[in-house]
Image: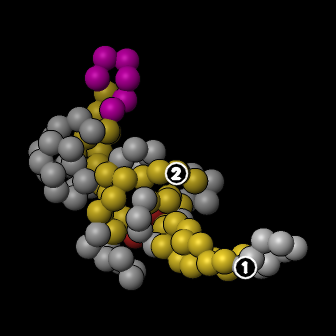
Amino acid sequence: MNIKKGDKVKVLSGKDREKTGKVTKALPAKGKIVVEKINIVKKHNKAKGATPGERIAVEMPLDVSNVQLVCSKCGKPARTGKKKVGEKMVRICKKCEAEI
């Protein structure tokens, strides 16, 4: 999975298409990510004793295939590649060849 926590992504499909946001959680085992203020659903909590029932807004995970990484240098959504710099492998933008 080439998207990590803290990356800026653009949503490609779904109800929040064309929106951008920051990744708050990555779930690589499931191939999903959680993006802040994207894919918000209402969750109903049942009343228990003295506490009343309520509806809360929750950010649900998106599939990684429905988002694209936004390059920090050129500011456009781009595919990523990998390049070896010294002993480390780094992600690069396929459009501008900058490190991400």
Q: CA distance from mark 2 to mark 1?
A: 28 Å
Q: Which residue is mark 2?
A: 25
Q: Nearer the viewer, residue 63 or 84?
A: 63
Q: Residue 33 appears at what percent x and percent y?
A: 50, 58
**Mark 2 / mark 1, whichever is N-terminal:** 2
* Other residues around mark 2 within 10 Å, as few (<14) / some (14–19) / many (≥20): some
Is 11 above or below relative to 85? below
Q: Which residue type does callout 1 highlight? A: Gly
As helix, strand or loop, the secondary structure at mark 1 comes to loop
Q: Residue 27 appears at what percent x and percent y?
A: 58, 53
Identify which residue is drawn at 29% across, 69% down: 19
> Can you say which quadrant of the picture contains the C terminus?
top left
Task: Report the side of 48 relative to 77 (left or right).
Answer: right
Q: Nearer the viewer, residue 49 or 91?
A: 49
Q: Which residue is mark 1?
A: 53
Q: Main secondary structure of the magenta part?
A: strand
The magenta span reads: 85-90
Is 71 above or below relative to 9? above
Residue 67 is a magenta residue: no
Identify which residue is drawn at 39% across, 82% down: 15
